[in-house]
Amino acid sequence: MEVAQNPTVSEKYQFFHSTDAACATSFGAKGTPAVVLFRKFDDSPVVYSGNWETTPVVDFLVSSSVPTLIEFSEEYIEPIFGNRRQALFLFRNKEDSD
């Protein structure tokens, strides 16, 4: 519940809480407690496997919320530069198909 109230993620994510262990395992969790992140890119869902303190869970959510490979746009400025994430840029012509 502390993670859901953390200002870093509270307004950017929707949180759902369930006490149903079968629900958790149906989405890949090994049991409860569990945090499962659903996203519209790369592999989804992603299951958190670290310790249960607020900061590591928030860090997991933030780091797992940017695709591995993206076509750079304004949408990704904050997740990459605002959080000081490491990034590798490849510059190429859009006409290149390789």
Image (cartoon, helix red, strand yellow):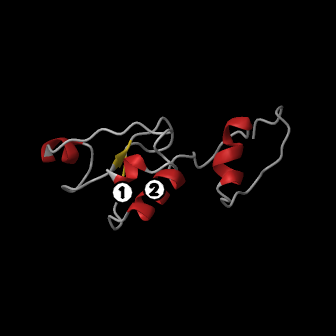
The CA span between labels 2 and 1 is: 10 Å
Which residue matches tag 1? 48
Q: Residue at 86% of width from left, 38% of height from top?
A: 93
In percent of the image, x 64 and y 56: which residue is there?
A: 83
Give the x, y percent position of residue 66.
Answer: 57, 46
Q: Is residue 78 above or below residue 73?
A: below
Q: Which residue is located at x 18 percent, y 41 percent?
A: 23
Q: Which amino acid, by three-letter code, is at mark 1?
A: Tyr
Instruction: Tell me the amino acid under the disc marked 2.
Output: Val
Along the viewing direction, whichever of 95 and 85 lies nearer the viewer: 85
As rendered, which of 45 and 56 lies closer to the eye? Answer: 56
Q: Quadrant of the C terminus?
A: top right
Horizontally, is 80 left or right of 33 in the view? right
Q: Which mark is residue 58?
A: 2
Secondary element at image label 2: helix
Most distant residue in the bottom direction: 51
Vertical position of residue 6 compared to residue 53: above or below? above
Q: Residue at x 71, y 53 (%)?
A: 81
Secondary structure category for the residue under label 1: loop
Which of the numbered marks, if any, corresponds to residue 36? none
